[in-house]
Amino acid sequence: MPPITSSYKRQYEDEEEYDSEMDDFIDDEGEEQDEISKHIREIFGYDRNKYKDESDYALKFMESSWKDQQKEEARSDSLQKELLKLIGNIPVRYQGRSYNLPILLWLLESFPFTPPICFLRPTSSMVIREGKHVDSKGRIHLLGLHNWDHPKSTVNGLLTEMIAKFEEEPPLATKSSTQGDNPNDLLAYVSNLNLNEGGNRFDQEVKVSVIGGGDLGIAAVLSIMAKSCVDKLVLIDIPESSTKGGTMDLEIFSLPKVEVSKDLSASAGSKVVVITANAWSDEQSYLSVVQTNVDMYRGIIPRLAQLSPKAVLLIASQPVDIMTHVAWRQSHLLPTQVIGLGCNLDSERLSHIINISLVANNTGKQAWVIGELSENKVALWGSMGPGTDQLQALTPVSNSTKPLMDRALEMLKGKGQRSWSVGLSIADITHSIVTDKKKIHSVTTLAEGWGGIGSKVFLSLPCILGENGSTRLPGVVLGSEDEMRLRESVACQVNLFMQLRL
Protein backbone atom coordinates (compact mmCIF):
# COMPACT_ATOMS: atom_id res chain seq x y z
CA MET A 1 0.00 0.00 0.00
CA PRO A 2 1.45 3.46 -0.90
CA PRO A 3 1.98 6.17 1.73
CA ILE A 4 -1.06 8.30 2.64
CA THR A 5 -0.47 12.04 2.96
CA SER A 6 -1.58 14.15 5.91
CA SER A 7 -3.72 16.27 3.60
CA TYR A 8 -5.61 13.17 2.50
CA LYS A 9 -6.18 12.19 6.11
CA ARG A 10 -7.47 15.69 7.00
CA GLN A 11 -9.72 15.70 3.93
CA TYR A 12 -11.55 12.53 4.87
CA GLU A 13 -11.44 12.33 8.64
CA ASP A 14 -14.34 14.81 8.87
CA GLU A 15 -16.51 12.63 6.65
CA GLU A 16 -16.30 9.50 8.85
CA GLU A 17 -14.33 8.30 11.84
CA TYR A 18 -10.74 7.64 10.79
CA ASP A 19 -9.15 4.39 11.93
CA SER A 20 -6.06 5.19 13.98
CA GLU A 21 -4.48 1.89 12.93
CA MET A 22 -4.14 3.35 9.43
CA ASP A 23 -1.59 5.81 10.83
CA ASP A 24 0.96 3.09 10.23
CA PHE A 25 0.66 3.85 6.53
CA ILE A 26 1.05 7.66 6.86
CA ASP A 27 4.64 8.55 6.28
CA ASP A 28 5.14 11.84 4.47
CA GLU A 29 7.27 13.67 6.98
CA GLY A 30 10.68 14.66 5.71
CA GLU A 31 9.97 13.75 2.08
CA GLU A 32 9.20 16.00 -0.84
CA GLN A 33 5.93 15.51 -2.72
CA ASP A 34 7.89 14.48 -5.79
CA GLU A 35 9.45 11.64 -3.78
CA ILE A 36 5.99 10.43 -2.70
CA SER A 37 4.79 10.54 -6.28
CA LYS A 38 7.88 8.60 -7.28
CA HIS A 39 7.00 5.85 -4.80
CA ILE A 40 3.47 5.62 -6.19
CA ARG A 41 4.72 5.42 -9.76
CA GLU A 42 7.09 2.62 -8.74
CA ILE A 43 4.34 0.65 -6.97
CA PHE A 44 1.21 1.31 -9.03
CA GLY A 45 2.69 2.49 -12.36
CA TYR A 46 0.92 5.84 -12.49
CA ASP A 47 1.59 9.45 -11.46
CA ARG A 48 -0.32 10.38 -8.29
CA ASN A 49 -0.30 14.10 -9.20
CA LYS A 50 -2.01 13.29 -12.49
CA TYR A 51 -4.50 10.78 -10.99
CA LYS A 52 -4.88 12.27 -7.49
CA ASP A 53 -8.68 11.87 -7.22
CA GLU A 54 -8.63 8.27 -8.43
CA SER A 55 -5.78 7.44 -6.02
CA ASP A 56 -7.50 9.01 -3.01
CA TYR A 57 -10.75 7.22 -3.82
CA ALA A 58 -8.96 3.86 -4.10
CA LEU A 59 -7.23 4.30 -0.77
CA LYS A 60 -10.47 5.30 0.95
CA PHE A 61 -12.22 2.26 -0.56
CA MET A 62 -9.45 -0.05 0.70
CA GLU A 63 -9.79 1.37 4.21
CA SER A 64 -13.57 0.92 4.17
CA SER A 65 -13.26 -2.68 2.95
CA TRP A 66 -10.79 -3.46 5.72
CA LYS A 67 -13.25 -2.19 8.34
CA ASP A 68 -16.06 -4.27 6.85
CA GLN A 69 -13.85 -7.33 6.96
CA GLN A 70 -13.11 -6.76 10.66
CA LYS A 71 -16.82 -6.46 11.43
CA GLU A 72 -17.58 -9.65 9.51
CA GLU A 73 -14.89 -11.58 11.40
CA ALA A 74 -16.31 -10.37 14.72
CA ARG A 75 -19.80 -11.41 13.64
CA SER A 76 -18.46 -14.82 12.61
CA ASP A 77 -16.87 -15.30 16.05
CA SER A 78 -20.20 -14.70 17.75
CA LEU A 79 -21.87 -17.39 15.61
CA GLN A 80 -19.29 -20.12 16.16
CA LYS A 81 -20.41 -23.67 16.86
CA GLU A 82 -19.74 -25.27 20.21
CA LEU A 83 -17.23 -28.10 20.12
CA LEU A 84 -17.81 -28.92 23.79
CA LYS A 85 -20.36 -27.79 26.37
CA LEU A 86 -20.15 -29.13 29.92
CA ILE A 87 -22.75 -28.23 32.53
CA GLY A 88 -22.38 -29.46 36.09
CA ASN A 89 -21.16 -28.74 39.57
CA ILE A 90 -17.78 -28.81 41.27
CA PRO A 91 -17.27 -29.80 44.93
CA VAL A 92 -15.67 -27.06 47.02
CA ARG A 93 -14.77 -27.25 50.70
CA TYR A 94 -14.80 -24.01 52.69
CA GLN A 95 -14.20 -23.78 56.43
CA GLY A 96 -14.82 -27.50 56.92
CA ARG A 97 -18.07 -27.66 54.92
CA SER A 98 -18.75 -28.97 51.38
CA TYR A 99 -20.63 -27.07 48.68
CA ASN A 100 -21.65 -27.76 45.08
CA LEU A 101 -20.94 -24.81 42.77
CA PRO A 102 -22.71 -24.83 39.36
CA ILE A 103 -20.55 -24.04 36.32
CA LEU A 104 -20.78 -23.99 32.52
CA LEU A 105 -17.73 -24.68 30.30
CA TRP A 106 -17.66 -23.89 26.55
CA LEU A 107 -15.12 -24.89 23.92
CA LEU A 108 -15.80 -23.03 20.66
CA GLU A 109 -15.14 -23.99 17.04
CA SER A 110 -12.26 -21.50 16.84
CA PHE A 111 -10.26 -23.52 19.42
CA PRO A 112 -7.23 -23.44 19.85
CA PHE A 113 -7.19 -19.78 18.79
CA THR A 114 -9.95 -18.99 21.28
CA PRO A 115 -9.43 -20.37 24.81
CA PRO A 116 -12.29 -22.17 26.63
CA ILE A 117 -14.92 -19.98 28.28
CA CYS A 118 -16.22 -20.79 31.75
CA PHE A 119 -19.10 -19.18 33.69
CA LEU A 120 -20.76 -19.67 37.05
CA ARG A 121 -24.45 -20.52 36.86
CA PRO A 122 -26.03 -18.93 39.94
CA THR A 123 -29.62 -19.89 40.74
CA SER A 124 -32.26 -17.35 41.65
CA SER A 125 -31.26 -17.62 45.31
CA MET A 126 -27.53 -17.03 44.66
CA VAL A 127 -25.45 -13.92 44.18
CA ILE A 128 -22.03 -13.68 42.54
CA ARG A 129 -19.18 -12.56 44.75
CA GLU A 130 -16.85 -10.68 42.42
CA GLY A 131 -13.19 -11.40 43.18
CA LYS A 132 -9.78 -12.30 41.80
CA HIS A 133 -11.06 -15.19 39.70
CA VAL A 134 -14.67 -14.15 38.91
CA ASP A 135 -16.01 -10.93 37.38
CA SER A 136 -19.38 -9.33 38.07
CA LYS A 137 -21.04 -11.32 35.26
CA GLY A 138 -19.86 -14.65 36.65
CA ARG A 139 -17.14 -15.29 34.06
CA ILE A 140 -14.29 -17.33 35.53
CA HIS A 141 -10.70 -16.21 34.88
CA LEU A 142 -8.06 -18.86 35.54
CA LEU A 143 -4.57 -19.52 34.26
CA GLY A 144 -5.64 -22.95 33.04
CA LEU A 145 -8.25 -21.38 30.76
CA HIS A 146 -5.87 -18.90 29.15
CA ASN A 147 -3.01 -21.40 28.80
CA TRP A 148 -5.13 -24.22 27.40
CA ASP A 149 -2.85 -26.49 25.38
CA HIS A 150 -4.52 -29.59 23.99
CA PRO A 151 -3.84 -32.45 24.69
CA LYS A 152 -1.70 -31.46 27.68
CA SER A 153 -4.54 -29.44 29.18
CA THR A 154 -7.46 -31.47 30.47
CA VAL A 155 -10.86 -30.68 31.92
CA ASN A 156 -9.87 -32.49 35.13
CA GLY A 157 -6.76 -30.29 35.44
CA LEU A 158 -8.86 -27.18 34.99
CA LEU A 159 -11.38 -28.34 37.60
CA THR A 160 -8.58 -29.04 40.06
CA GLU A 161 -7.29 -25.48 39.64
CA MET A 162 -10.82 -24.08 39.90
CA ILE A 163 -11.56 -25.97 43.11
CA ALA A 164 -8.28 -24.81 44.70
CA LYS A 165 -8.97 -21.14 43.87
CA PHE A 166 -12.60 -21.25 44.99
CA GLU A 167 -11.66 -22.87 48.28
CA GLU A 168 -9.52 -19.77 48.94
CA GLU A 169 -12.23 -17.33 47.86
CA PRO A 170 -15.81 -18.67 47.38
CA PRO A 171 -17.44 -17.08 44.30
CA LEU A 172 -21.09 -17.51 45.29
CA ALA A 173 -23.23 -16.65 48.29
CA THR A 174 -26.89 -16.94 49.26
CA LYS A 175 -29.01 -13.86 48.74
CA SER A 176 -29.72 -12.15 52.03
CA SER A 177 -31.99 -9.32 53.08
CA THR A 178 -29.21 -7.93 55.26
CA GLN A 179 -26.30 -5.92 53.96
CA GLY A 180 -23.31 -7.87 52.70
CA ASP A 181 -22.83 -11.44 51.64
CA ASN A 182 -21.42 -13.97 54.04
CA PRO A 183 -19.33 -16.68 52.35
CA ASN A 184 -20.43 -19.07 55.11
CA ASP A 185 -23.93 -18.83 53.63
CA LEU A 186 -22.90 -20.63 50.42
CA LEU A 187 -25.57 -22.97 49.20
CA ALA A 188 -24.93 -26.53 50.29
CA TYR A 189 -27.16 -27.85 47.53
CA VAL A 190 -28.49 -26.74 44.15
CA SER A 191 -32.12 -27.76 44.01
CA ASN A 192 -33.12 -26.72 40.50
CA LEU A 193 -30.07 -28.17 38.75
CA ASN A 194 -30.76 -31.78 39.74
CA LEU A 195 -27.12 -32.24 40.70
CA ASN A 196 -25.98 -34.88 43.16
CA GLU A 197 -23.95 -34.71 46.31
CA GLY A 198 -20.26 -35.32 45.83
CA GLY A 199 -17.79 -34.88 43.05
CA ASN A 200 -17.47 -33.95 39.42
CA ARG A 201 -20.82 -34.91 37.86
CA PHE A 202 -21.26 -33.36 34.41
CA ASP A 203 -24.21 -33.83 32.09
CA GLN A 204 -22.95 -37.14 30.74
CA GLU A 205 -24.90 -40.34 31.35
CA VAL A 206 -23.68 -42.32 34.35
CA LYS A 207 -24.49 -45.97 33.86
CA VAL A 208 -24.10 -48.81 36.36
CA SER A 209 -24.73 -52.51 35.73
CA VAL A 210 -25.52 -55.22 38.28
CA ILE A 211 -24.83 -58.82 37.24
CA GLY A 212 -26.96 -61.34 39.14
CA GLY A 213 -30.70 -61.36 39.68
CA GLY A 214 -30.91 -62.85 43.19
CA ASP A 215 -31.80 -61.17 46.46
CA LEU A 216 -28.45 -59.40 46.66
CA GLY A 217 -28.69 -58.16 43.08
CA ILE A 218 -32.18 -56.73 43.71
CA ALA A 219 -31.02 -55.18 47.01
CA ALA A 220 -28.06 -53.58 45.22
CA VAL A 221 -30.32 -52.14 42.50
CA LEU A 222 -32.76 -50.60 44.99
CA SER A 223 -29.97 -49.22 47.21
CA ILE A 224 -28.06 -47.66 44.30
CA MET A 225 -31.21 -46.03 42.93
CA ALA A 226 -32.04 -44.70 46.41
CA LYS A 227 -28.66 -42.91 46.39
CA SER A 228 -29.73 -41.08 43.17
CA CYS A 229 -26.21 -41.22 41.79
CA VAL A 230 -26.85 -42.85 38.39
CA ASP A 231 -28.77 -42.00 35.24
CA LYS A 232 -29.28 -45.59 34.13
CA LEU A 233 -29.04 -48.93 35.94
CA VAL A 234 -29.03 -52.27 34.13
CA LEU A 235 -29.82 -55.51 35.99
CA ILE A 236 -28.63 -58.59 34.11
CA ASP A 237 -29.85 -62.02 35.19
CA ILE A 238 -27.40 -64.54 33.75
CA PRO A 239 -28.45 -68.20 33.27
CA GLU A 240 -25.22 -69.56 34.80
CA SER A 241 -26.05 -68.06 38.19
CA SER A 242 -28.11 -69.91 40.81
CA THR A 243 -29.07 -66.56 42.37
CA LYS A 244 -32.15 -65.87 40.26
CA GLY A 245 -35.80 -65.10 40.75
CA GLY A 246 -36.19 -61.38 41.45
CA THR A 247 -35.96 -59.94 37.95
CA MET A 248 -39.55 -60.84 37.04
CA ASP A 249 -40.89 -58.61 39.80
CA LEU A 250 -38.79 -55.71 38.53
CA GLU A 251 -40.14 -56.30 35.03
CA ILE A 252 -43.70 -56.25 36.37
CA PHE A 253 -43.27 -53.28 38.70
CA SER A 254 -40.89 -51.30 36.51
CA LEU A 255 -38.72 -48.63 38.11
CA PRO A 256 -37.57 -45.39 36.44
CA LYS A 257 -34.03 -45.60 35.00
CA VAL A 258 -33.85 -49.39 35.60
CA GLU A 259 -33.52 -51.82 32.68
CA VAL A 260 -33.79 -55.59 33.12
CA SER A 261 -31.92 -57.79 30.64
CA LYS A 262 -30.43 -61.24 30.11
CA ASP A 263 -27.81 -60.03 27.64
CA LEU A 264 -24.36 -58.95 28.86
CA SER A 265 -24.09 -56.47 25.98
CA ALA A 266 -26.67 -54.31 27.77
CA SER A 267 -23.89 -53.40 30.24
CA ALA A 268 -21.72 -51.67 27.58
CA GLY A 269 -20.35 -48.31 28.63
CA SER A 270 -20.91 -48.77 32.36
CA LYS A 271 -19.04 -46.71 34.92
CA VAL A 272 -19.31 -49.48 37.54
CA VAL A 273 -20.11 -53.17 37.01
CA VAL A 274 -21.28 -54.92 40.20
CA ILE A 275 -21.12 -58.72 40.17
CA THR A 276 -23.38 -60.39 42.75
CA ALA A 277 -23.86 -63.69 40.92
CA ASN A 278 -22.94 -66.97 42.63
CA ALA A 279 -23.13 -70.58 41.47
CA TRP A 280 -23.58 -72.37 44.76
CA SER A 281 -24.53 -76.02 45.38
CA ASP A 282 -24.82 -77.61 48.83
CA GLU A 283 -23.73 -80.99 47.49
CA GLN A 284 -20.23 -79.87 46.53
CA SER A 285 -17.04 -79.45 48.55
CA TYR A 286 -15.81 -75.93 49.28
CA LEU A 287 -13.13 -76.18 46.59
CA SER A 288 -15.67 -77.45 44.07
CA VAL A 289 -18.05 -74.61 44.88
CA VAL A 290 -15.32 -72.01 44.41
CA GLN A 291 -14.25 -73.67 41.15
CA THR A 292 -17.87 -73.50 39.93
CA ASN A 293 -17.86 -69.77 40.56
CA VAL A 294 -14.51 -69.45 38.77
CA ASP A 295 -15.95 -71.31 35.76
CA MET A 296 -18.97 -69.00 35.75
CA TYR A 297 -16.69 -65.94 35.90
CA ARG A 298 -14.69 -67.28 32.94
CA GLY A 299 -17.83 -66.93 30.84
CA ILE A 300 -18.73 -63.38 31.88
CA ILE A 301 -15.73 -61.38 33.18
CA PRO A 302 -13.71 -61.08 29.93
CA ARG A 303 -16.88 -60.02 28.07
CA LEU A 304 -17.81 -57.43 30.71
CA ALA A 305 -14.29 -55.96 30.64
CA GLN A 306 -14.44 -55.77 26.84
CA LEU A 307 -17.82 -54.00 26.88
CA SER A 308 -16.76 -51.47 29.57
CA PRO A 309 -12.94 -51.19 29.47
CA LYS A 310 -12.91 -48.08 31.69
CA ALA A 311 -15.32 -49.45 34.29
CA VAL A 312 -14.57 -50.38 37.88
CA LEU A 313 -15.51 -53.99 38.61
CA LEU A 314 -17.04 -54.33 42.09
CA ILE A 315 -17.10 -57.97 43.18
CA ALA A 316 -19.66 -59.20 45.70
CA SER A 317 -19.60 -62.92 44.85
CA GLN A 318 -18.32 -65.29 47.53
CA PRO A 319 -15.62 -65.85 48.65
CA VAL A 320 -15.05 -62.20 47.84
CA ASP A 321 -11.25 -62.17 48.31
CA ILE A 322 -10.68 -65.11 45.96
CA MET A 323 -13.29 -64.03 43.40
CA THR A 324 -11.86 -60.49 43.23
CA HIS A 325 -8.46 -62.03 42.46
CA VAL A 326 -10.04 -64.27 39.81
CA ALA A 327 -11.87 -61.31 38.22
CA TRP A 328 -8.62 -59.32 38.04
CA ARG A 329 -6.81 -62.21 36.33
CA GLN A 330 -9.60 -62.89 33.85
CA SER A 331 -10.40 -59.26 33.00
CA HIS A 332 -6.80 -58.12 32.33
CA LEU A 333 -7.78 -54.73 33.80
CA LEU A 334 -5.57 -52.67 36.08
CA PRO A 335 -5.66 -53.79 39.73
CA THR A 336 -7.06 -50.36 40.62
CA GLN A 337 -10.11 -51.14 38.44
CA VAL A 338 -11.00 -54.42 40.19
CA ILE A 339 -12.11 -54.26 43.82
CA GLY A 340 -14.22 -56.40 46.12
CA LEU A 341 -16.87 -55.52 48.67
CA GLY A 342 -14.43 -56.66 51.38
CA CYS A 343 -14.81 -55.33 54.91
CA ASN A 344 -16.56 -52.07 54.02
CA LEU A 345 -19.74 -53.03 55.87
CA ASP A 346 -17.84 -54.24 58.95
CA SER A 347 -15.72 -51.07 59.03
CA GLU A 348 -18.74 -48.77 58.89
CA ARG A 349 -20.55 -50.82 61.53
CA LEU A 350 -17.52 -50.92 63.84
CA SER A 351 -17.08 -47.13 63.71
CA HIS A 352 -20.78 -46.66 64.38
CA ILE A 353 -20.75 -49.05 67.36
CA ILE A 354 -17.75 -47.31 68.91
CA ASN A 355 -19.08 -43.78 68.46
CA ILE A 356 -22.76 -44.37 69.22
CA SER A 357 -22.85 -47.27 71.67
CA LEU A 358 -19.55 -47.25 73.54
CA VAL A 359 -18.26 -43.68 73.68
CA ALA A 360 -20.25 -41.22 75.78
CA ASN A 361 -19.15 -38.19 73.79
CA ASN A 362 -19.13 -38.81 70.06
CA THR A 363 -15.49 -38.06 69.21
CA GLY A 364 -15.76 -39.20 65.60
CA LYS A 365 -13.34 -42.10 66.03
CA GLN A 366 -12.80 -44.02 62.80
CA ALA A 367 -12.09 -47.75 62.93
CA TRP A 368 -11.14 -49.98 60.03
CA VAL A 369 -11.48 -53.72 59.53
CA ILE A 370 -8.85 -55.14 57.18
CA GLY A 371 -7.68 -58.53 55.94
CA GLU A 372 -9.72 -61.52 54.89
CA LEU A 373 -13.49 -61.59 55.21
CA SER A 374 -13.29 -64.32 57.86
CA GLU A 375 -12.43 -64.79 61.52
CA ASN A 376 -8.92 -63.52 60.75
CA LYS A 377 -10.08 -59.92 60.36
CA VAL A 378 -7.84 -57.24 61.91
CA ALA A 379 -9.03 -53.92 63.37
CA LEU A 380 -7.12 -50.62 63.07
CA TRP A 381 -7.66 -47.06 64.21
CA GLY A 382 -7.78 -44.23 61.72
CA SER A 383 -6.23 -40.87 62.59
CA MET A 384 -8.28 -38.13 60.95
CA GLY A 385 -7.04 -34.62 60.08
CA PRO A 386 -8.31 -31.76 62.29
CA GLY A 387 -11.61 -30.39 61.03
CA THR A 388 -11.66 -32.72 57.99
CA ASP A 389 -12.85 -36.17 57.01
CA GLN A 390 -9.50 -37.10 55.50
CA LEU A 391 -7.51 -39.99 56.93
CA GLN A 392 -3.99 -38.99 57.96
CA ALA A 393 -2.66 -42.31 59.24
CA LEU A 394 -3.57 -45.85 60.23
CA THR A 395 -2.51 -46.99 63.68
CA PRO A 396 -2.70 -50.45 65.27
CA VAL A 397 -4.76 -51.04 68.39
CA SER A 398 -2.69 -50.20 71.48
CA ASN A 399 -2.98 -51.71 74.97
CA SER A 400 -4.93 -48.69 76.18
CA THR A 401 -7.55 -48.91 73.40
CA LYS A 402 -7.71 -52.72 73.16
CA PRO A 403 -10.58 -53.16 75.68
CA LEU A 404 -12.74 -50.70 73.72
CA MET A 405 -11.94 -52.35 70.40
CA ASP A 406 -12.48 -55.88 71.74
CA ARG A 407 -15.91 -54.96 73.09
CA ALA A 408 -16.85 -53.33 69.78
CA LEU A 409 -15.72 -56.40 67.82
CA GLU A 410 -17.75 -58.66 70.09
CA MET A 411 -20.85 -56.55 69.40
CA LEU A 412 -20.05 -56.67 65.69
CA LYS A 413 -20.20 -60.49 65.68
CA GLY A 414 -23.92 -60.38 66.38
CA LYS A 415 -24.60 -58.44 63.19
CA GLY A 416 -25.45 -60.63 60.23
CA GLN A 417 -24.78 -59.77 56.60
CA ARG A 418 -28.27 -59.74 55.14
CA SER A 419 -28.90 -58.97 51.47
CA TRP A 420 -30.27 -55.49 52.10
CA SER A 421 -27.39 -54.49 54.39
CA VAL A 422 -24.81 -55.72 51.86
CA GLY A 423 -26.81 -53.92 49.15
CA LEU A 424 -26.47 -50.67 51.09
CA SER A 425 -22.70 -51.23 51.31
CA ILE A 426 -22.55 -51.80 47.53
CA ALA A 427 -24.45 -48.56 46.96
CA ASP A 428 -22.08 -46.69 49.29
CA ILE A 429 -19.03 -47.82 47.32
CA THR A 430 -20.71 -47.23 43.94
CA HIS A 431 -21.67 -43.70 44.97
CA SER A 432 -18.06 -42.85 45.88
CA ILE A 433 -16.85 -44.07 42.48
CA VAL A 434 -19.39 -42.44 40.15
CA THR A 435 -19.24 -39.09 41.97
CA ASP A 436 -15.42 -39.19 42.30
CA LYS A 437 -15.93 -38.57 46.00
CA LYS A 438 -12.42 -39.63 47.09
CA LYS A 439 -13.91 -41.29 50.17
CA ILE A 440 -11.94 -44.00 52.02
CA HIS A 441 -13.41 -47.51 52.12
CA SER A 442 -12.05 -50.84 53.31
CA VAL A 443 -12.37 -52.82 50.06
CA THR A 444 -10.73 -55.92 48.64
CA THR A 445 -7.68 -54.92 46.60
CA LEU A 446 -4.32 -56.27 45.50
CA ALA A 447 -2.33 -56.44 48.75
CA GLU A 448 1.10 -57.23 47.34
CA GLY A 449 3.65 -54.85 48.90
CA TRP A 450 1.33 -53.67 51.71
CA GLY A 451 2.86 -54.22 55.15
CA GLY A 452 5.53 -56.51 53.73
CA ILE A 453 3.13 -58.88 51.92
CA GLY A 454 5.09 -60.49 49.09
CA SER A 455 2.36 -62.59 47.42
CA LYS A 456 -0.21 -61.58 44.83
CA VAL A 457 -3.24 -61.91 47.06
CA PHE A 458 -6.35 -59.76 47.48
CA LEU A 459 -7.26 -58.53 50.97
CA SER A 460 -9.52 -55.81 52.33
CA LEU A 461 -7.48 -52.62 52.90
CA PRO A 462 -8.36 -48.92 53.27
CA CYS A 463 -8.47 -47.36 49.78
CA ILE A 464 -9.47 -43.98 48.39
CA LEU A 465 -12.23 -44.52 45.82
CA GLY A 466 -12.91 -42.27 42.84
CA GLU A 467 -13.87 -42.38 39.18
CA ASN A 468 -10.60 -44.13 38.23
CA GLY A 469 -10.96 -46.84 40.85
CA SER A 470 -8.99 -47.39 44.03
CA THR A 471 -5.83 -45.89 45.52
CA ARG A 472 -4.43 -48.01 48.33
CA LEU A 473 -3.25 -46.26 51.50
CA PRO A 474 0.27 -47.00 52.87
CA GLY A 475 0.80 -50.00 55.12
CA VAL A 476 1.36 -49.96 58.87
CA VAL A 477 3.41 -51.96 61.36
CA LEU A 478 1.01 -54.37 63.05
CA GLY A 479 1.26 -56.03 66.42
CA SER A 480 2.47 -59.63 66.48
CA GLU A 481 -1.01 -61.10 66.94
CA ASP A 482 -2.56 -59.07 64.13
CA GLU A 483 0.38 -59.73 61.81
CA MET A 484 0.03 -63.48 62.42
CA ARG A 485 -3.67 -63.32 61.44
CA LEU A 486 -2.83 -61.47 58.25
CA ARG A 487 -0.06 -63.93 57.36
CA GLU A 488 -2.42 -66.84 57.95
CA SER A 489 -4.97 -65.30 55.58
CA VAL A 490 -2.29 -64.85 52.91
CA ALA A 491 -1.13 -68.48 53.25
CA CYS A 492 -4.71 -69.83 53.02
CA GLN A 493 -5.44 -67.78 49.91
CA VAL A 494 -2.23 -68.81 48.15
CA ASN A 495 -2.96 -72.48 48.93
CA LEU A 496 -6.55 -72.29 47.63
CA PHE A 497 -5.65 -70.26 44.57
CA MET A 498 -3.04 -72.81 43.47
CA GLN A 499 -5.77 -75.48 43.33
CA LEU A 500 -8.10 -73.48 41.08
CA ARG A 501 -8.29 -73.73 37.29
CA LEU A 502 -8.60 -70.15 36.03
Image (tube, rainbow, N blue to C red):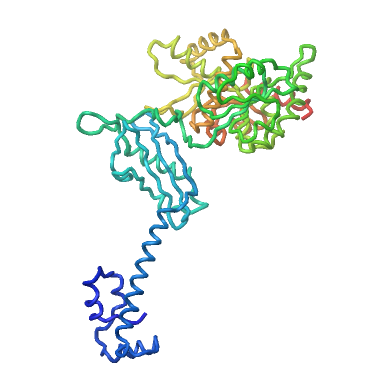
Residue nearest the viewer, comparing 369 with 486: 369
Marks counted in the figure total 0
State the quadrant of the C terminus.
top right
Residue 448 to residue 19: above or below: above
The residue under the point 32% across, 44% down is 134
Work out whether residue 468 can be spotted.
yes
Residue 5 to residue 94: above or below: below
Residue nearest the viewer, comparing 208 with 156: 208
Residue nearest the viewer, comparing 392 with 112: 112
Q: Horizontal and vertical percent for residue 347?
A: 53, 19
- Residue 318 shown left or right of residue 196 in the figure: right
Q: Horizontal and vertical percent for residue 498?
A: 76, 27
Q: Which image quadrant is residue 47 in?
A: bottom left
State the quadrant of the N terminus.
bottom left
Q: Which image quadrant is residue 68 in?
A: bottom left
The residue under the point 22% across, 28% down is 177
Q: Horizontal and vertical percent for residue 186?
A: 32, 31
- Residue 230 shown left or right of residue 281 in the figure: left
Q: Horizontal and vertical percent for residue 247?
A: 66, 18
Work out whether residue 481 can be spotted.
no
Residue nearest the viewer, comparing 185 with 387: 185
